[in-house]
Amino acid sequence: MSRPMQFDRVPLSARIGMAIILAYVAAALFGPFLAPYGQTEVAGDQWTPLFWSQPGSDGDVFFLLGTDHLGRDLLTRLLYGARNSIGIALVTTLLAFAAGVGIGLLAATKQGVVDQIASRSIDVLMAFPSLIFALMILAVLGSSIPVLIVVIALLNMASVFRITRALAMDLEAQDFVDVAKLRGESALWIMRRELLPNAMVPLAAEFGLRFCFVLLFIASLSFIGLGIQPPMADWGSMVRENASAISFGVFTPLIPAAAIAGLTIGVNLVIDWLTNSRSVGNEA
Amino acid sequence: MRHEKMDPSCGEAVLDIAGLNVRARSGNHWHPIVSDVSLTLRRGEILGLVGESGSGKTTIGLASLGFARTGCAFAGGEVRFKGQDLLRMAPAARRALRGDRIAYVAQSAAISFNPARTLMEQVIESVVDRGTKSRAEARADARALFRLLHLPDPDRIGDRYPHELSGGQLQRVMAAMAMLPRPDLVIFDEPTTALDVTTQVEVLSVVRELVARFGTAAIYISHDLAVVAQLAHRIMVLRHGRLVEEGETRKMLAEPQEPYTRSLWAIRTFAKDSLPASDVLLEVNGVSASYGSLKALDNVSLTLQRGRTVAVVGESGSGKSTLARVVTGLLRANGGEIRFSGETLAASAKSRTKLQLQRLQIIHQSADASLNPLHKVREVIGRPLEFFFGLTGAQRERRIVEILEQVELGAEHLDRLPSEMSGGQKQRVCIGRALAAEPALMICDEATSALDQLVQEGILKLLTRLQQEQQISYLFITHDIATVRAIADRIVVMHRGRVVQEGPKDEVLAPPYPPYTKLLLSSVPEMDPDWLDRLLASRKQAVSDKAVS
């Protein structure tokens, strides 16, 4: 990519997206230092509203975003949760992409038997409804973070494989790949130098989407109690823990839900810009 | 019957374009793509727009519909259609004119039709939707037009789907669709460019007939002057979005005023002399190949000598590109043998030796498709140097520049991406990549077909020079007879996967011809406004002779 990045040509929507992502990354990196209370510390009453202060053991205590069902500070939990939710989702997505892209490119380059074996195995994997599959594995192996990461990565790898294979198959039919083959280049070289760079933009877009799906999937697993286990903070489980507050007219559970939504929107704003700017650049 | 080119100069003006400017955006700035072009078109008149790609001819054609493509905008001037300025009209009013009073026939009919619906539904759709005609009337009229356009089985052809027709037939159906509302103005945008020469003739004669019959005004856009000369009353030559020269067809052909126009006329004068025989480099013996059950090559044999050129000619579907795929080893032959420098080549490129791969290089038709859009020139040419000869660092860099100079480019192109070069430059880079491997044989698969005429000539000269300097053999695959005349020593004519004629250039291109060669050669348009008339007359004569005997 030779075109220099010029920040003044980045559209407003993408800048907003970048700002959102930066804020989340900062929260994930420095959350524990910024958090006013401990992750599991019970500091106040149950489900206090926003901007709530109440007398504590030594002076008044203040809760910017209120407290949760056990009286823990919601802002603190949210900051700790950023690290868990984003970190796990990111590792999982990266793992899914490493495997999916690798196998997808290999299937497109080798074709024939290799492609058949890879594609049919992925078909089997995709035949299971993903939530049921995850529930089954987590029920058998128990819910620990490594198991969670591997299982969700495996499930997402299937669709990453599909997309990569389709993209690479199109590229593989191009004359420049024929030229490389006729030169006697190895499959690995063709995958790395000819196919992957040209598939990068759609894959980056897919990465953004996948990341959001994974984040939501972990959240929903946590919501049904099979994801990240208490007392560790995680946005999905925070929604679940506080869900019953809705019936009392307290909107505490909406705050972690908004945290999930915000990140999803931020990532998508940036991804939209990336895909658009690249396609315009190719036209010129 | 001779076609009369009537004098339309007294008819009413249908289209009047004055001082048209169109600009296009790249990044943040605008640059002009059409500058100050004016034209007037009267009822019954055909105006030919001629120019290379990028000359703005399609932009002007679309402007006649009051339309600018995405990324383009009108920047001044008027486009008056029967007195109304299309550029300053309410969008709804403009839309009402399009496809009704003004029709457009696109280059590729094959991709312009919806494959999931029958032709009749698509042909009558706009007329019926507008309520100009009832469904039954429209159908009857469409059938009449199909008959007029010499489509086979005109009463039932409308019930077929696009994939069931040939490219030439689809192009005629599209012409019927355009004529159905009896428009005042039709724009034909390279309607025959994607067709074989043999099919092109039928479409040309039909276009001319339609315009004459309905007194429609027409703009005919093409890069091929010989084609335009058959139809147009007047010709406008465009370059870089500006008018170079305009004039009445015969006058312009006889005495072009501008140097650029003259260069377009003179283009196909380049021809190299046939060289004497030399030792055999490539031998193809009785090769057959198929795609699934479809037989693409049937017992094809040819020989190619060192430092010589064999041209393989034929229309699309004749198997000539399949032959290239088989020789390179991208497609396995079902039978037969290919010998290269005295060794038998394995059927698949994977099983060939590195030396064999190195000595046999290919140049594709589309430089765009054969260059990785993300690789710079340095990498494109440097990779074979590194791969075959282990060159690295400064040595490699020196050799890349040397090769660039051989293909008449320079060191300033080293860091260019394909998107930053013109079509001709890209094809030169492809040739450079092949040269880097120091090949004995280059297969040129329609290597010049996608290029403008002037650029084509440059590439052909380059290839000829390289052949003299490095004793490279070319297997030159093309459908273009002019290219064959320019470059070949021997010619192989292919038709439906078989070789129908083979021999030295001077023998094949001189009578007596076998029937297919005759058809192919006679279909190549000549720079003579009467060529089509003569051709149609002689074919009609041949048919009636046959009927009598």
Image (tube, coloured by chain):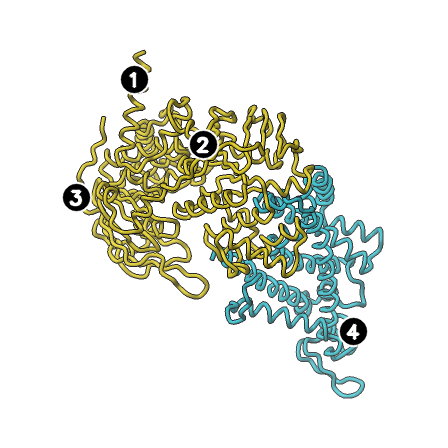
Chain colours: A cyan, B yellow
Q: Amino acid at mark 3?
A: Ser
Residue B13 seen in render = yes
Nearest to viewer (mark 2 / mark 3)? 2
Quadrant in the picture for the N terminus of chain A: bottom right
Q: Which residue is mark 4?
A: A39
The residue singled out by tag 2 in the image is B315
Q: Considering depth in this image, is A35 or B209 the residue closer to the camera? A: B209
Given the image, on which type of amino acid does mark 2 rest? Glu
Q: Which residue bears the numbered disc 1? A: B544
Residue type at mark 4: give it: Gln
Residue B466, compared with residue A13, is above or below; it is: above
Circle 2 or circle 4, nearest the eye: 2
Q: How many marks?
A: 4
Q: Residues within 10 Å of mark 2 (few under 14, many from 20)?
A: many
Displayed quadrant of residue B356 = top right
Residue drawn where x is 54% and y is 44% of the image: B470
Marks 2 and 4 in Cβ contact (< 8 Å) = no
Q: Could you say where residue B269 lies in the image, as x and y percent from the top left?
A: 36, 41
* Residue A127 as seen in the image, left or right of residue B431: right
- Measured in 3D between alpha carbons, the distance from the residue under mark 4 to the one under mark 3, in whole angstroms, is 89 Å
